Image (cartoon, helix red, strand yellow):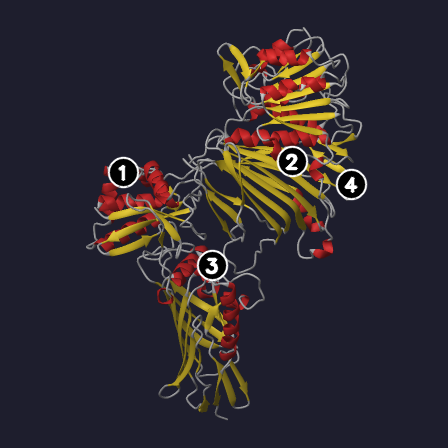
């Protein structure tokens, strides 16, 4: 059933139905005393937005008078008739000396903080406050035929009651009730006028009532303002309906006609050839200068304010993106994730400048909201999804939006601010404002930056960075998991403060209950040492279902250990916490450890840099780092993304980061033995039996492959998932291997089959190549590249292979290639041939990759060494066959 909102249709109209912003008006833009950093930043941004709107009017105002805390910081549009003043009672009232001599229409836009001084409603400015009587006396001294007022502050209804007269028309954020919170309506009025500057006073009122109701409804909040229209001596008219009448249907709202310079293009869209001031300085590039990308970010602006109050964080983000190719049309599809009710997102501009100069604007209110699925009490984020029209080559997309966090889930702010993108950026600016007394730590990840410009204001410090021509973030094969080039920021005083906070919020999560004690006793009933007990518990917890919910702002505290045990699933911190609790029941020392998996934490940047959790176990003098997340990871191995990271141990003594051990090649080894029967040389293949024994990462990778292949009848030879023979081809007859879930056993693989193409025959001469197995990644590693190699998920690797060949009994004149070796510290290797008694020969191969996470210089060196290796592996054994 469809219900309609019945918005008021105003019965009265100002005598002249001109636009709310009439031509040649005198406009006063009055922002009050901010009082804190958040308000200071917000008021400053809104004041600049009003100036941009006024400067873009078809007929600009005769004069604009601005009042603010910091007049010198305003960014004035070019050739705008603006005079700047400090927001004081004296400055505001003295303006009558100028305006008393003019008859231009007057528009006054005032917002800020209001309240009561005794029994008198006041508007806060520096020094003595402005009162309703001050506003009334001000209006009485202006000879304008009429004046229009927007008042958005607590107590504005009391001011409007004093001001309303035959020639003074007002929209106030309140009627009779004085609310305890500041109104939100001013940005909504600004958005409505930006979409249609020709709105009349009446139509602006109707639109403001509608969007105010929608704003509170969308956020499921009780409305704490009553936008009200005051016309002459008529009864004040509330513009928003009662809460009981609110529905999501908009069909009964007032429909405003487009301005003369705009025409309707499609639902929610307008087309105009008059570019707003925001487009000043935006110039297209030549597609031929960027042949490898589908688009270019012409300008990016990112601004964050960390207030420490409510809202705790606000941001404004703006992008101008030029589409360069037909394939670049996808750049007009936007998908933003946010997390209500804590986080809010508000779109200000969604528009496209077509190649012919027409500007198509999408109504930001039409942006859809899509909810993600939740799992139990893990809340999923919501998404705003929309597509801009007309995104053909040459078009420029413009998206500007604001976000706010009412309260941050940590006692201090700690977060990354993405800066670069998959597209090149010609001009980028990042700005962060923090309260003056706040600690502020920052670092750039994957991005070089100079020292910031720092400006001090009344309530805060603002740090600014500028970047010219940022390259696109590359996504090459065999690169480390891509981390967006970001500015990392934190207001935590130090690591000790962070550790104390996290220990406090996770307190009691690892409580040892009777159920935990009973389960630990059951799991370790056959164990005789503490290491065996820890291993048995590890194998159990690792085998529990993993629910992949990131360790983020909606879920950073581990669930109670007994709850995870009962449910038999959890995310990384839940499983680690359960593991610790089970060990605690056995009087074994274990602590939760926060890990920046595939990323990094910084000693001088205390805060939440972590996306993963593991455990630290102390068994006597031995410290073990244990990750229970992956169900194919054996006890004693850290899975991909963990080794070498700087981590935080959550205990009562740690006041800084600890580095996890770097892996060594000897701990990540693949042993391969092959017996190849060449007694009857045949071009159709040589029978072979293979046996592989894996430790460390090869064990992990082969278990994962076995787990993935489970249930597939015609699966690949398991070794062939990650490795390939360097000569010939292997045809599988049968294979068997250790069960993937048998974490207590070393992983072994055995196979039988045939090698084809390792022997060639010419008359009575035969040539034989040893089909050593190498990682498939090494073939791709030889490609030209611009980013460092990331091999074997960052692990080192040791290969030891022994191939035993049985030659024909009558083979003679056996000639071996020379033994060869490479002495590079990064990739030492050795190939040796050995003739045993009779007709048996051995080919032995040993190689070590010292580490898999390489620098760009190491990548170049490794590629050179791999070329030598592949040439050396082409060596052949020659032998003579009987006639």
In the image, taking residue 53 as reference, residue 507 lies left or right, namely left
Residue displayed at 52% across by 11% down: 120
x, y percent for residue 235: 65, 6
> Mark 3 and mark 1: span between their CA atoms?
46 Å
> Mark 2 and mark 4: span between their CA atoms?
26 Å
> Mark 2 and mark 3: span between their CA atoms?
69 Å
Q: Is residue 851 above or below residue 65?
A: below
Q: Is residue 141 above or below residue 748?
A: above
Indicate which label's residue lies in the foreground, 2 or 4: 2
x, y percent for residue 64: 70, 26
- According to the picture, the residue beneath numbered tag 3 turns out to be 713
For label 2, the crowd category at 10 Å Cα-Cα, with few meaning under 14, some 14 to 19 and many 20 or more, is: some
- According to the picture, the residue beneath numbered tag 2 turns out to be 75
x, y percent for residue 121: 54, 13
Q: Secondary structure at mark 2?
A: loop
Mark 2 and 3 residues: CB-CB less than 8 Å, in contact? Answer: no
> Mark 4 and mark 1: span between their CA atoms?
66 Å
């Amino acid at each position: 059933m469809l219900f309609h909102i019945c918005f008021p249709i105003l019965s009265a109209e100002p005598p002249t139905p001109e636009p709310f912003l009439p031509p040649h008006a005198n406009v006063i833009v009055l922002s009050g005393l901010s009082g804190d950093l958040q308000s200071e930043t917000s008021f400053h941004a809104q004041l600049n937005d009003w100036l941009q709107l006024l400067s873009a009017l078809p007929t600009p105002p005769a004069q604009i008078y601005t009042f603010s805390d910091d007049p010198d910081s305003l960014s004035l549009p070019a050739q705008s008739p603006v005079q700047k003043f400090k927001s004081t009672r004296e400055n505001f009232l003295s303006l009558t000396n100028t305006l008393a001599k003019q008859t231009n229409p007057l528009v006054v836009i005032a917002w800020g903080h209001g309240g009561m001084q005794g029994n008198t409603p006041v508007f806060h400015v520096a020094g003595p406050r402005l009162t309703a009587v001050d506003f009334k006396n001000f209006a009485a001294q202006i000879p304008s035929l009429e004046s229009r007022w927007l008042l958005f502050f607590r107590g504005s209804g009391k001011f409007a009651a004093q001001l309303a007269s035959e020639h003074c028309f007002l929209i106030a954020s309140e009627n009779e009730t004085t609310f305890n919170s500041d109104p939100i309506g001013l940005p909504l009025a600004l958005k409505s006028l930006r979409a249609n500057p020709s709105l009349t006073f009446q139509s602006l009122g109707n639109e403001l009532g509608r969007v105010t109701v929608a704003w509170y409804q969308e956020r499921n909040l009780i409305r704490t303002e009553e936008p009200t229209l005051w016309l002459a001596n008529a009864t004040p008219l509330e513009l928003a309906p009662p809460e009981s009448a609110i529905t999501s249907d908009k069909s009964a709202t007032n429909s405003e006609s487009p301005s003369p310079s705009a025409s309707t293009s499609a639902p929610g869209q307008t087309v105009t050839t008059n570019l707003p001031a925001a487009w000043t300085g935006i110039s297209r590039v030549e597609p031929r200068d960027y042949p490898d990308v589908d688009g270019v970010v012409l300008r990016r602006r990112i601004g964050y304010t960390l207030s420490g109050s409510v809202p705790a964080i606000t941001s404004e983000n703006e992008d101008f993106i030029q589409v360069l190719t037909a394939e670049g049309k996808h750049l007009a599809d936007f998908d933003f994730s946010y997390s209500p009710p804590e986080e809010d997102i508000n779109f200000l501009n969604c528009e496209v400048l077509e190649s012919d100069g027409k500007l198509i604007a999408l109504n930001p209110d039409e942006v859809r909201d899509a909810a993600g699925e939740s799992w139990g009490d893990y809340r999923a984020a919501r998404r705003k999804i929309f597509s801009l029209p007309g995104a053909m080559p040459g078009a420029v997309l413009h998206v500007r939006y604001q976000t706010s966090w009412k309260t941050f889930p940590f006692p201090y702010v700690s977060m990354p601010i993405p800066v670069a993108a998959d597209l090149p950026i010609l001009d980028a600016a990042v700005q962060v404002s923090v309260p003056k007394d706040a600690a502020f730590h920052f670092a750039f990840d994957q991005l070089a930056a100079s020292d910031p410009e720092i400006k001090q204001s009344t309530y805060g410090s603002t740090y600014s960075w500028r970047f010219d021509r940022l390259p696109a973030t590359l996504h090459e094969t065999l690169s480390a998991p891509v981390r967006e080039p970001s500015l990392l920021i934190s207001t935590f005083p130090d690591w000790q403060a962070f550790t104390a906070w996290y220990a406090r919020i996770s307190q009691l999560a690892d409580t040892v209950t009777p159920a935990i004690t009973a389960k630990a006793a059951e799991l370790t009933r056959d164990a005789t040492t503490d290491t065996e007990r820890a291993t048995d518990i590890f194998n159990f917890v690792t085998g529990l279902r993993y629910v992949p919910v990131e360790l983020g702002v909606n879920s950073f505290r581990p669930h109670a250990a007994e709850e995870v045990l009962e449910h038999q699933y959890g995310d990384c911190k839940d499983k680690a916490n359960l593991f610790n609790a089970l060990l605690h029941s056995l009087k074994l020392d274990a602590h939760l450890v926060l890990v920046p998996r595939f990323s990094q934490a910084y000693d001088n940047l205390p805060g939440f840099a972590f996306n993963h959790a593991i455990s630290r176990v102390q068994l006597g003098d031995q410290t073990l780092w244990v990750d229970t997340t992956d169900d194919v990871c054996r006890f004693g191995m850290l899975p991909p993304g963990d080794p070498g990271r700087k981590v935080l141990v959550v205990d009562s003594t740690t006041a800084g980061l600890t580095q996890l051990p770097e892996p060594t090649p000897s701990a990540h080894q693949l042993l391969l033995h092959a017996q190849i029967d060449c007694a009857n040389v045949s071009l159709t293949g040589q029978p072979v039996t293979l046996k592989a024994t894996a430790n460390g990462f090869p064990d992990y990778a082969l278990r994962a492959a076995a787990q993935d292949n489970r249930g597939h009848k015609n699966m690949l030879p398991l070794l062939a998932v990650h490795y390939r023979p360097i000569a010939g081809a292997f045809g599988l007859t049968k294979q068997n291997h250790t069960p993937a879930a048998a974490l207590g056993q070393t992983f072994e693989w055995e196979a039988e089959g045939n090698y084809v193409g390792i022997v060639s025959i010419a008359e009575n001469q035969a040539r034989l190549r040893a089909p050593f197995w190498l990682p498939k990644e090494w073939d791709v590693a030889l490609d030209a590249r611009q980013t460092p190699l990331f091999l074997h998920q960052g692990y080192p690797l040791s290969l030891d292979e022994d191939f035993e060949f049985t030659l024909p009994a009558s083979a003679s004149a056996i000639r071996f290639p020379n033994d060869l070796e490479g002495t590079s510290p990064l990739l030492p290797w050795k190939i040796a041939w050995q003739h045993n008694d009779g007709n048996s020969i051995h080919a032995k191969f040993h190689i070590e990759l010292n580490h898999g996470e390489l620098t760009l210089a190491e990548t170049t060196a490794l590629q050179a060494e791999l070329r030598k290796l592949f040439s050396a592996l082409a060596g052949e054994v020659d032998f003579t066959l009987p006639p």
